[in-house]
Amino acid sequence: MIILGTNSIKDTGYDVANSLRFNTGSSDYIVRTFGSGGDRKTFTFSWWIKRVGVGGSDYFISGMSGSSEFNMFFDSSGRFGIDDFNGSAYGFQLRTNRVFRDPSAWYHFVLAFDTTQGTSTNRIKLYINGTQYTWDNQTTYPSQNYDTQANVNGRVLEIGRLGGSYNTAYADMYLAEMVFVNGSALAPTDFGEFDSDSPTIWKPIDVSGLTFSTNGFYLDFEDSSALGNDVSGNNNDFTVNNLTAIDQSTDTCTNNFATMNPLFKADGSQIAYSEGNLKTTASNESQKNAVSTIAVTSGKWYCEMVSRTGTNYPGFGIMDTGSTLQTSLSYLGSTADSYCMFQGGLDYNNGSENDIGTSWGENVIMGIAIDLDSSTKTIKYYKAGSEIHSRTISTPANGYAFAVSHRTNGTITEINFGSPPYSESGGNSDGNGFGNFSMSVPSGYYALNTKNLAEFG
């Protein structure tokens, strides 16, 4: 299964520069302690999120103190929920039937709290991508004038994990434009708007002019040396744990980059995905593949890949979305609609082997460029800034996704579509200024993201 990219508009008006990439395997989170009490009845949370882990629970905002707690989470089915426990009973428990399991999509959430409202269903309003959503799974609303466990003096608020004694539950996600406004139950239009030319696409607006009030904060993740920096003017900064400049990403709600696709299960689920779905690790000795979330039928596209372990067997290339490799287990390049260059220097297509005479070892960054616009369509491979091989490819029947192939147990590959999961000092971008690549991007080729897709895809 291939998921095509979302929010494909070139001009988004207000552009979000950065997100923060959380990885459960690295125990990433940010935390702050409220230094004073605020309004516990009326407040608003707003955030943009791109989920990475789609098979487990994600407790991504958690406020705990003793036996009381306030949590926001996605359950193991992908449903969004919130709960509040006052130490003896739940003040509210709300959950959606809608699931959020698209690893290629950015979602915008607004939670507007006002427990002074006389109608119970008006006390906690949920908006998803600009539209109000009616809670339809668990629907235990707070009583009128209920004091939530949020905004309490001394409360520890953690983003990226479930707090308290349960602090082994970490979130996999990209998070952008994280906002907390104290004292006001705001509407989604305070944070976003529908695009005038593409009215089904919801996009962010500048929120810096909001009144955040006591304990309010705005995290834009733009300072790589202080990723927990609050830019609301309140200086309610968060302490960063196990997050570094590498975790600052340019994959955002206004420019959505390709990642690898954890929903691709032809391998029998024998690949582990991490680092924002940009790192793949094989867990047995059989052949298995991983593919990108975005597939293309036109344009010229570039990415870089590196193998960390697995001599000779790791391979990089492309696969048609209609390939039998989508449902059957075989190596990349074993079919007519897939192409692969293995680390040992073997070029494969339709099961035919071609030794190009150039190999590479672990930790060597390789470039891949595909040209789907020229009359003769090609895939080219690069090493150390030089082209080492080029071959003709067929016109895709459905669309080509970038792909990696594994065979040896423990094989690790990392993929850079422009926002690398590893430290990259190359600083090379495409002609539109997108990406941080090791090698110079070939002229006329572009990073695979939605702004470039809107122009060239």
Image (cartoon, grey):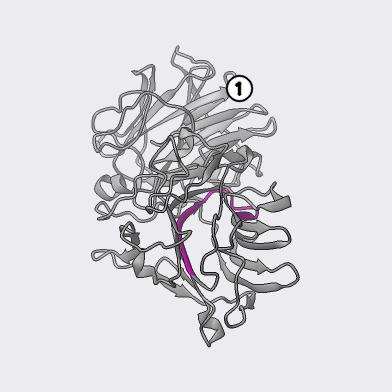
Q: Is residue 415 above or below residue 149?
A: above
User: Is residue 53 toward the left or the right of residue 237 in the image?
Assistant: right
The one of 339 and 12 positioned closer to us in this rendering: 12
Check disc 1: other Cα within 10 Å, few if <14, some if 14-19, many if 20+. Answer: many
At horizontal 53% and vertical 37% (from top left) the residue drawn is 243
Instruction: Point out the residue furthest to the top here.
Output: 357
Instruction: Point out the residue furthest to the front here.
Output: 36
At horizontal 64% and vertical 78% (from top left) the residue drawn is 140
Asked if residue 53 is among those painted magenta in the image, a careful observer would answer: yes
User: Is residue 405 toward the left or the right of residue 254 in the image?
Assistant: right
Q: Is residue 321 above or below residue 243?
A: below
User: Is residue 180 toward the left or the right of residue 302 in the image?
Assistant: right
Instruction: Point out the residue furthest to the bottom here.
Output: 118
User: Is residue 2 toward the left or the right of residue 24 in the image?
Assistant: left
At horizontal 68% and vertical 58% (from top left) the residue drawn is 65
Magenta highlight range? 43-60
Question: Would you say the magenta stretch is mainly helix, strand or loop?
Answer: strand
**Tag 1, which secondary structure?**
loop
> Residue 110, image x and y in percent?
46, 66
Q: Which residue is mark 1?
A: 310
> Residue 341, image x and y in percent?
47, 25
Asked if residue 187 is among those painted magenta in the image, a careful observer would answer: no
Is residue 52 shown to the viewer in this render?
yes
The amino acid on which the numbered mark 1 sits, given as a three-letter code, is Gly
